[in-house]
Image (cartoon, helix red, strand yellow):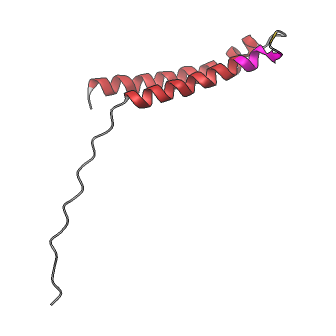
Amino acid sequence: MTVERRKLESTALFLTLFAAMLIMPPLALVFQVEDRFLGIPVEVIYLFFVWAGMIVAAHWLGRQLPRELTAEPPADPPAVDDD
């Protein structure tokens, strides 16, 4: 496993935990105010942007992680005559 792959996997873990913290009630409740933006509560906008950010980060990380090398399939066995 290369160092670059390990760094990206660590980044994926960090982003997952960070996003989970962002939607936990103690932090999400900070945005629970009476204000509205275009008629939408600020808390809903916050949660939507966190959710959208998680999707964008997952897409980016999926593109950055190199594909694992797969073993070549075994060669076809020689044909056997049933005479």
The magenta stretch is 39-45
| Quadrant of residue 69 within the rendered picture | top left
**Above or below: residue 75 compared with residue 35:** below
Residue occupying image coordinates x 41% and y 30%:
63
Query: Is the N terminus in the top left, top right, bottom left or bottom right quadrant?
Result: top left
Query: Is the C terminus in the top left, top right, bottom left or bottom right quadrant?
Result: bottom left
Residue 83 makes an appearance in the image: yes
Q: Residue furthest bottom?
A: 83
**Above or below: residue 78 compared with residue 66:** below
Instruction: Please tell me which residue lies in front, 6 or 52.
Output: 52
The number of discs equals: 0
Question: Is residue 44 shown in magenta?
Answer: yes
| Quadrant of residue 27 within the rendered picture | top right
- Is 47 positioned to the left or the right of 39 in the image? left
List x then y, in percent, for residue 82: 18, 87
Instruction: Please tell me which residue lies in front, 62 or 30.
Output: 62
List x then y, in percent, for residue 79: 16, 75
Question: Is residue 16 shown in magenta?
Answer: no
Q: Residue furthest front?
A: 38
List x then y, in percent, for residue 76: 20, 65
Residue occupying image coordinates x 50% and y 24%:
57
